Image (cartoon, helix red, strand yellow):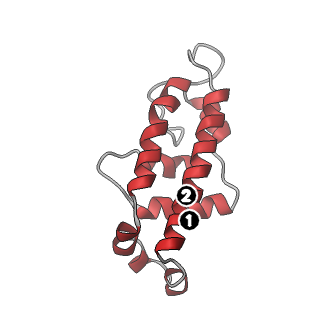
């Protein structure tokens, strides 16, 4: 599930605050797609996608969250998310995604020629 949310952030035509918010909830509940990425995705694919993911998280600012996320979440949660809280959420998500990516890059095979199922066609959701 976390891998799918990170994969959604890579979409060129989407910058969705909901993805960042959902990732923050998944992180809070212990999600970690690192092992999936190590088993299924070549190091080069991970290395190529890492900067794009980090850049996408950076551009999803509070104005976007206020317009595209806050109206659609529960009022009690909405009230707790101001600009400072949104920035903290984004920083935490960026930190975790960066750790996941770095760990997966370290553990992933570069060639895809071993017993891993790694291929360039598999996305960060493992599909």
**Residue 35 location in percent, x, y?**
67, 37
**Residue 82 location in percent, x, y?**
48, 77
Task: Report which quarter residue 59 is drawn in.
Answer: bottom left
Whether residue 1 is visible: no
Question: Which is more toward the observer, 28 or 126?
Answer: 28
Q: Are marks 2 and 1 in contact (CB under 8 Å)?
A: yes
Which residue appears at 63% of the width and 26% of the height? 108
**Disc 1 target residue:** 88
**Residue 93 location in percent, x, y?**
56, 56
Task: Report which quarter residue 106 is drawn in.
Answer: top right
Vertical comparison of 12 with 68: above or below = above
Which residue appears at 45% of the width and 30% of the height? 48
Vertical comparison of 42 with 96: above or below = above
Tag 1 secondary structure: helix
- Name the residue at the front extreme: 84
**Disc 2 target residue:** 91
89 sits to left or right of 59: right
Task: Report which quarter residue 89 is drawn in.
Answer: bottom right
């Amino acid at each position: 599930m976390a891998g799918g949310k990170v994969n959604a952030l890579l979409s060129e035509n989407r910058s969705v605050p909901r993805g960042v918010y959902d990732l923050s909830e998944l992180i809070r509940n212990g999600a970690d797609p690192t092992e999936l990425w190590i088993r299924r995705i070549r190091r080069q694919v991970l290395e190529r996608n890492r900067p794009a993911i980090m850049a996408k998280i950076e551009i999803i600012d509070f104005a976007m969250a206020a317009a595209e996320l806050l109206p659609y979440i529960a009022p009690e949660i909405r009230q707790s998310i101001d600009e400072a809280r949104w920035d903290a959420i984004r920083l935490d998500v960026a930190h975790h995604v960066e750790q996941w990516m770095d760990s997966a890059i370290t553990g992933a095979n570069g060639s895809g020629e071993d017993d891993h199922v790694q291929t360039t066609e598999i996305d960060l959701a493992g599909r």
